[in-house]
Every structure is written in structure tokens, then in C-alpha cells.
Image (cartoon, rainbow, N blue to C red):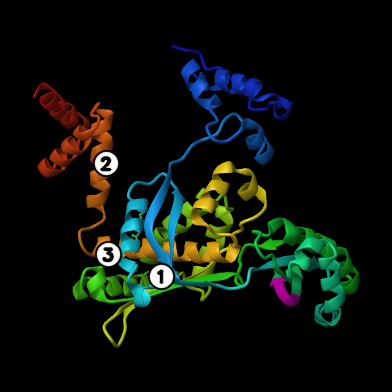
Amino acid sequence: MQADIIRCSRLPGFHKMTIDEKINIVKSWANLSDDEVKLLKTFGNLDPKIAEAMVENVIGAMSYPLGIATNFRVNGKDYLVPMVLEEPSVIAAASNAAKMLREANDGNGIRAEASKQLMIGQIHLMKVPSPHSAAMEIINRKEELLDLANSTSQTLVKLGGGAKDIEVRIIETKRGVCLAVHLIIDVIDAMGANIVNTMTEAVAPYLERIAGGEARLRILSNYAIYRLAKAWVRVDPEHVGGREVAEKIADASAIAEADVFRAVTHNKGIMNGIIAVALATAQDHRAIEAGAHAYAARSGIYKPLSTWDIDAHGYLTGVLEVPLQVGTVGGAIKTHPIAQIALKILGVKTARELAEIMAAVGLAQNFAALKALVTTGIQLGHMKLHAKNIAIAAGARGELIDIIAEEMIKEGRISFSKAVELLKKYLKQ
Ligand code: MEV
């Protein structure tokens, strides 16, 4: 029996080591093989120097598949949509849905519209002696505060962006009253976190003086309620599988509106599309997720982000509305070479257009999921890919992959042993 070795994760100076040195430490910690180390050192399309400029303590890079969803037409314009994710069927489903929805809205495809790119920066002040008069005073000094915020980002102001407005909320916390001051900032084509955080930090001392309190938090809110994207379709049921399918999709939507357990899964399907585009373009996908789910619960009850109905003329209509904090400039979007390629494939320059496409992809993804669920079920598509993967694992190559996968599905036996058995049979022929 091997004696337990007491290992210590306390590694002083680890962050200063070279990548090779770090890998050596992790190698002995986890007993990694030489092949595993070799794989770790394969950074693929991400230069190790860039990786190290992005995050800390880097020992490798992890590749996820980058696929292209085809058939998208949004606001009358065609797009190829790069998507990064680990889940089978999602890209195929999006492409399939986009094909059906091309004819929506009189041939314009999916319609989408994003609002201005307004983010909220928050300064939370505690120990304010007279919160109501402080709130009034802050509003009175709005112009001074906006000027101060804008002095931190001349470039943004020159482009027409910058801090535009101020809101003040008085909130009760269990540790006393808090004055929440919101800076409303037009970040144009940036995701905006840096700009917003710089501005909140710049105005906080001034706010402390006006209010006579102490700033505790000075940071953006990821609840980006002023940065919304909307996508919608109105489509003849004949283009989406017929009247019966359309009715069932509307039923599925109604169920999601009435059942929070279903609403979460419904929204997960939407996020399959949105987050895959976010990953391909190196967005802060955690921010998007956090904002989207909070928005889904804005009424106090968690609801679906999209709804589907049949209108008075018998057309299927679908609408999605979601806050999208995405950028086309700055941060990892700029430094990750694949994100740059993804943006080039999309052909978008503005955050607004990117948000519109992402909302459209979310709606298409949702449509695909609901359609599959109310007709064949979701497993058929999954099974096809699963069977293919098993065939490959068993050693099938080329056309044998599809032949073996289909045979396993037909026989209802999708297993490694069955794939090996079939492979032997076909190789003998
Ligand atoms: C799976 O990743 C996503 C779905 O569960 C979404 C849905 O149920 O609407 C299929």
C-alpha cells in the first residue's frame, strides 16, 4: 500500500516562476505523465506570452471546438456565426433553426435591435447622516459629477460616449441605510468594465464629501438593464414544420412561463447560443450569464427570457429580450487572436450589432430546442453524435463512422462493444 504523502498547496513564489517551472511543480503534484505534460505545453492558437498577459499562474491553454453556425439572416443580412462550446448538437440545431427562420419577417430573417450600450456604475455609500438630503444634493451636482467621471476617459467622450446620467437609490441593509449612486455610462463598443470602474473610483471621494458618508463599493453592476438586446420572429408555420408544431411550441413557451423549473432549462437553451458566441469572441460570459438570469427574475419570479405565441393570423411569433454586455474592442477581445478572427467572420464592428446577432442566435437556439422537444425529443440528435463518437473511439474512420453509428441507432444498442463488433464485421468485408 502506498503511504499517503502530505502535500502542501502553499507555493510561495509560484506566480514568479516560468511556465516550465510551474508545469514541473504541477507534474509532480499530480503525477502527470510526460505525454500529459507535452499536451499542456501545446498552447495551440494562444501564444504563451498572451496567455500570461491574460491570467495568472498559467500552465497551458485549453482548446474548445470552434464551429460555424450557418444560415443566419438577421435584419436582412446574412451571417456566419462562430460558436465555441463543448456540447454536441447545439451548432447543428442553431444552423437548422436559422434555416427555417430565414423566411421570417417577410424574408428579413430574425429581426433584432439592441439599445444604446449603457452600463451602470455603482457607488455604495454607508454612514450617510441624512440620506434624503444627500440624494438631493447629488442630483443637484449632477453636471459636476458627470464632468469628473468623464475627465477619466477623454477618448470615450470624443466618440460620443461617457457618463450621461446619475441615479440615486436609498436602500436598507441589515447594517444600516445605504446610498446607492448609479453612474449611467455609454461605453459604445467596449464591454465597459474598466471604463465604468475607473469612473466610479474617480467620483467616489467627491460623493463621500457631498454625502458625508463612506464609499464601500465602487464598481459596475452586471445587471445591465439599460443595455438590452431584443430579437423577434414572425413566421408562417409552414416554414417551421406546420401548424401543429407551431401550436406545440407555443404550449412549451406557456409552460416555461408558468413553471420556474422549466423556465431555467428554457433559458439554459437560450444561453447555449449566446454564450457560445460570447466564448468565440472572448466576451466576459460570466457577466452575461449573471445579468441574463437576474433579468429573467426582474418581476420577482424567474421567467423565460423568450416567449412564443400564435398571432391572430396564425403566424408563430417569438420574442427574446436579454441584457447583453458585450464589446468589440478592448481586453481579451483584442488580445485573443481567435476572437479577432471570430469578429472578422461575423463581420461586425460595433457592440450593438454583435449584441443583435447574439440575441438572434439565442432566439434561434431556443426555437430549435423547443421544436425538437415537442416533436422527436432531444435525444435523437444527441444519440447520433454520441453513436458517432463511440464509433470513432472503437477505431472507425472515414465513412465507416456514419455506417456504424447508424447501425447502432437502428438496433437500439449504442455501446463500445457493439461498435467494435460492427467494425470487425465491416473490416472483414
Ligand atoms: C440542452 O443543452 C438545452 C435544452 O435543454 C434547452 C431546452 O430544454 O429548452 C434542450
Dot 1 beta carbon under 8 Å from ligand 1: no
- Give left or right: position of 233 versus 301: left
The main secondary structure of the magenta stretch is: strand
- Mark 3, other Cα within 10 Å: few <14 / some 14–19 / many ≥20: many
Element under disc 2: helix
Disc 3 vs disc 1: Cβ atoms closer than 8 Å? no
Percent x, y for residue 330?
Answer: 67, 52
Element at label 3: helix
**Which residue of the protein is positioned furthest toward the bottom in this rendering?**
312
Which residue is located at x 57 percent, y 30 percent? Answer: 60
Q: Secondary structure at mark 1?
A: loop
Q: How many marks are shown on the rendered structure?
A: 3
Residues drawn in magenta = 165-172
Mark-to-mark CA distance, 1 and 2: 31 Å
**Which of pointers 1 and 2 lies earlier in the amino acid sequence?**
1
Q: Quarter of the image containing the C terminus?
A: top left
Question: Residue 236 location in percent, x, y?
Answer: 27, 76
Residue type at numbered disc 3 = Lys
Asked if residue 95 is positioned above or below residue 25 in the image, the reply reads: below
Query: In the rendered structure, does residue 297 fall within the stretch colored magenta?
Result: no
Give the mark, 3 or 1, whose residue is nearer the N terminus. Answer: 1
Give the residue furthest to the top: 1
Q: Which mark is residue 345?
A: none
Quarter of the image for the N terminus: give it: top left
Taking the image as drawn, is residue 223 in sight? yes
Residue under the point 14% across and 23% down: 427
Spot occupied by residue 371 in the image (x, y as percentages of width and height): 27, 64
Residue indicated by mark 1: 110
Q: Residues within 10 Å of mark 1 (few under 14, many from 20)?
A: many
